[in-house]
Amino acid sequence: MSHFVDITDLDAEAITDVMILAQMPIEGLGRPLEGLGAALIFEKPSNRTRHSMEMAVVQLGGHPIYTQGGEVGIDSREPAEDIIRIMAGYHRIIAARVFDHAVLERMIAALDTTDDDESTSVVNMLSDRSHPLQALADLLTMSQLLGDLSDRTVAWVGDYNNVARSLGEVSAMNGMHLRYSAPAGYGPEQSELDRLIALGAASAASSPDPKEAVQGAHAVHTDTWVSMGEEAEAEQRRADFAGYRVDEALMRLAAPDAIFMHCLPAYRGLEVTEAVIDGPQSAVITQGHNRLHAARGALAHLMGVRP
Ligand code: CP
Ligand code: NVA
């Protein structure tokens, strides 16, 4: 049984295979989900993840069922363990967007300790810790637009959040240099940078100065300063991150061919200016479209399809 809740659930070879699968014609993948179900459970709102996952399941021959978290009531209507063990009787894939990453781990543990169904995969569609499907699309976008990624530099300006962590992992596993910049208390700990080096990063550094992080970078990423679930901290976060907006002056410090990336949704005028996100260096629409290709590649790989 295999699950996909963190990028590190895949090794470097598997990630390369997913990238190839993502770019193959759909017909070349066969219909590995033919006659099979995929539950897509969302405790939080979504545009890209819901639509890309639904379409990826359909393109692989399966049947997606979208469910809002409130309908199944994870740990309110019934425990996550009961939900997953019942759904495993209906679905080959159970994908969830959850507030608490531990819920995904409990779901996997419940499947692993039961004989109910040994062929159900749990997929993370974003938790407080990670967003691996986003990271696959980010990798696909960077490799399409920048070519060979080894020794290229990824800069992340802003909160070291779920998206930043998964992007760091996938970039590290592809030998990239990683530079983070965040205000005190919002950046990666040294232990986290050490972990990224151990995963294969050419280097990993964090600085409170966004100029230092962006200098010469090939891909400049940011994300909202207030992730879903952090709304109560919004005012404080907007004050703390005020100096971390990606604007044209900051982008001028990056490499001349640098791309700007953002997982979206974006808040223009806060973490990024309109001129940058809607400007010539922005890759955000390609990046968003790549969510479908990456999701299809990841699900095909989970189903045992290999290039
Ligand atoms: N980037 C991303 O996951 O977008 P959604 O929240 O719209 O799914
Ligand atoms: N970091 C953001 C990403 C949204 C796709 C959040 O968790 O809300």
Image: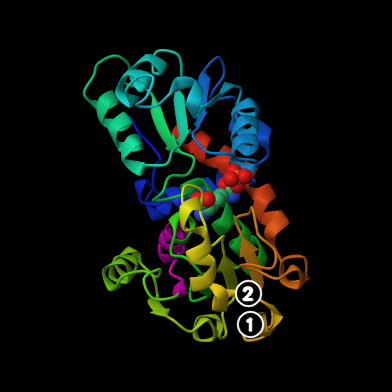
- Residue 8 in the image: state x and y as whole percent: 36, 51
Q: Is residue 250 left or right of residue 33?
A: right
* Distance from the alpha carbon under mark 1 to that under mark 2: 6 Å
Verify whether residue 237 appears in magenta. no
Q: Amino acid at mark 2?
A: Val
Figure quadrant of residue 33: top right
- Residue 216 in the image: state x and y as whole percent: 57, 85
Q: Nearest the camera: 36 or 247?
A: 247
- Residue 102 in the image: state x and y as whole percent: 31, 40
SS at badge 2: loop
Q: Nearest the camera: 33 or 219?
A: 219
Q: Is residue 247 left or right of residue 82?
A: right
Crowding around mark 2 (Cα neighbors within 10 Å: few <14, some 14 to 19, many 20+) is: many
- Residue located beneath label 2 in the image: 246
Q: Residue at x 77, y 72 (%)?
A: 275
Q: Amino acid at mark 1?
A: Leu
Q: Are marks 1 and 2 in contact (CB under 8 Å)?
A: yes
Magenta residues (range): 165-182
- Residue located beneath label 1 in the image: 250
Q: Residue at x 62, y 82 (%)?
A: 254
The yes-or-no answer for disc 1 within 8 Å of ligand 2 is no
Q: Nearest the camera: 286 or 126?
A: 126
Q: Residue at x 40, y 78 (%)?
A: 206
Q: Nearest the camera: 25 or 283?
A: 283
Q: Is residue 109 left or right of residue 221?
A: left
Crowding around mark 1 (Cα neighbors within 10 Å: few <14, some 14 to 19, many 20+) is: some
- Residue 49 in the image: state x and y as whole percent: 59, 40
Residue 232 circle label: none
